Amino acid sequence: MNENWTEDERYERWDLPFYEKVAAPILPPEVLDFHAHVWTRAHWKRVPWDANAPGARYMVTETEYSIEALQADAHRIFAGRTYKAVCFGNPTPAADLDATNDYVAQAGRLPGIFPLMIVGRDTTPRERILERIGKDGFFGYKVFLNWFGDDYGHVRIEDMLGPAEMEIANEYRLIVLLHVPRSGRLADPEVQRGVRALSRDYPDAQIVLAHCGRCYLPDEMKEAIGAVSDLGNVYMDTAMHMEPHVFETILRTLGPRRLLFATDFPVANMRGRRVYVMDHWVDLVLAGYPESAYRVQSNNIRATFMAYEIVAALRRAAEQAGISRAELGAIFHDNGMELLRRVRRP
């Protein structure tokens, strides 16, 4: 380990050998990332982690992460693969939703970019949602997070989405990418009740639980998975998940077709790994990244891109669950494309 290496030297000596040995052999020619953010500084009402509000530093990342930056990272990290992405801005009260949705709509004109519109309960009139889905090519919603930082303890699913938004999603088979609230995440009975209600009442909406329902701990996923096992229109994305046992539980219970590869760029372009300690996740990363809650920095480790750790965890889980190479490959592209192809237009 040499702290004086340049970025290019670290990439050549650490990242590429790991990628070629562990990740590349199981990746298909085209990779679909079902969860990637893009934004510019102009989209912020205020940069959230510059504030002194409680939870403001829950997740600190780049102030600006353009579509060009995403594509450059993807070209470098997924070398030799065609990268596609389901993209959206930052879905928090700190963002100007009109500005960030406009930017993502423009990005959606690029090949392989599938935009989602940030929508929450009563954030956008019905007519405006229909207009933008038809005119701007949005494939559905990234659900608005109507809280700051980690102040989500009493939020319910019905506080995030209402009938007006879900009736449209149901009619046009839209993607509904949902970051569930509450400290118990999908293992919380209240969250489970809300997800089941959405699935039951809007059976043609395609509900994707971001971050596998935020169950980063294997025991947490075991508590949660039974609540969605019979919901055929509920899927999970792998954003920032790096625990093989979590993926193994999903593969054994839901099967591989309901799991979608995702990174959460720009977060997953850090070098490190998300681990868990007691009852919470922790990001263990190399030194040099901004300070953030649940982020521990060290130069006493070797580390590569978190995106590779997601791929490695999926590979290990597939081996343990007995998933075929074809089924594993579909997680990285075909499963997500199937959902996108079902979307209808007003």
Image (cartoon, grey):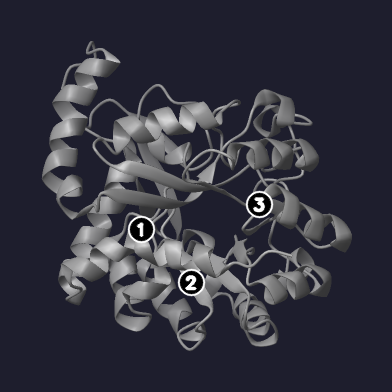
Look at the image and tell me in which quarter the C terminus lies.
bottom right
Q: Quarter of the image holding residue 314? A: bottom left
**151 sits left or right of 58 in the view:** right
> On screen, 138 above or below 6?
below
In the rendered image, is residue 125 in sight?
no
Residue that appears at 35% across and 68% down: 218
Q: Nearer the viewer, residue 123 or 151?
A: 123
Task: Give the Cα distance between marks 1 and 2.
Answer: 14 Å
Label 2: which secondary element: strand
Q: Which mark is residue 142?
A: none
Q: Quarter of the image holding residue 321? A: bottom left
Report which residue position mark 1 lands on: 333
Q: Nearer the viewer, residue 19 or 273?
A: 19
Label 3: which secondary element: loop
User: What is the x, y in percent for residue 95?
Assistant: 74, 38
Comparing marks 3 and 2, which lies closer to the viewer?
3
Residue that appears at 81% across and 55% down: 131
- The kind of residue tagged 2 is Tyr
**154 sits left or right of 85 in the view:** right
Q: Residues within 10 Å of mark 2 (few under 14, many from 20)?
A: many
Mark 1 or mark 3, earlier in chain:
3
Residue that appears at 64% across and 27% down: 40
Task: Give the Cα distance between marks 1 and 3.
Answer: 20 Å
Q: Residues within 10 Å of mark 1 (few under 14, many from 20)?
A: many
> On screen, 13 above or below 143?
above
- The kind of residue tagged 1 is His
